[in-house]
Amino acid sequence: MRGTTGRRRVPKEAILKLKIPVPPSWEQEEIANILLTVDKMLELEYQRKHYLEELKRGFMDLLLTGKIRIENTSE
């Protein structure tokens, strides 16, 4: 560690000497495929959520303006 101003920092040389394990390319591709699948699923869920929010907004507008009514069936 270096530094005299109270802010300790790691020397650049120490970082350059670090050995970072990297998985083989076939494993990296498998990981990437899994992540792509999850990204696609998330995008579909965001689209579905947006559609349902718009649908709700439309129904709330119709209900609040009295354009449609719901019968009370709990009695």
Image (cartoon, rainbow, N blue to C red):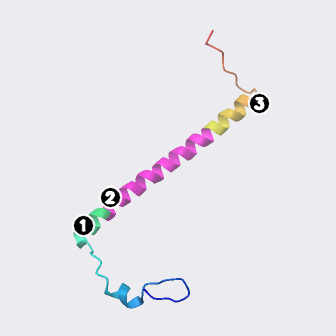
- Frontmost residue, 4 versus 38: 4
Q: Which residues are magenta?
A: 32-55
Secondary structure under badge 3? loop
Report the residue marked by disc 3: 65
Q: Are marks 1 and 2 in contact (CB under 8 Å)?
A: no
Q: Position of residue 32 (x, y in %)?
A: 33, 64
Quarter of the image with the C terminus is top right
Membership of 49 in magenta stretch? yes
Tell me if residue 74 comes above or below residue 14 in the rendering: above
Left/right placement of residue 22 relative to residue 64 reads left
- Disc 3 to disc 2, C-alpha distance: 47 Å
Secondary structure under badge 2? helix
Q: Residue at the location (41% across, 89% down)?
A: 12
Quarter of the image with the N terminus is bottom left
**Residue furthest top in the image:** 75
Report the residue marked by disc 2: 34
Q: Residue at the location (24% across, 72% down)?
A: 25
Q: Nearer the viewer, mark 3 or mark 2?
A: 2
| Mark closer to the chain start, 3 or 1 | 1
- Label 2 crowd bin: few (<14), some (14–19), many (20+), radius 10 Å: few
Secondary structure under badge 1? helix
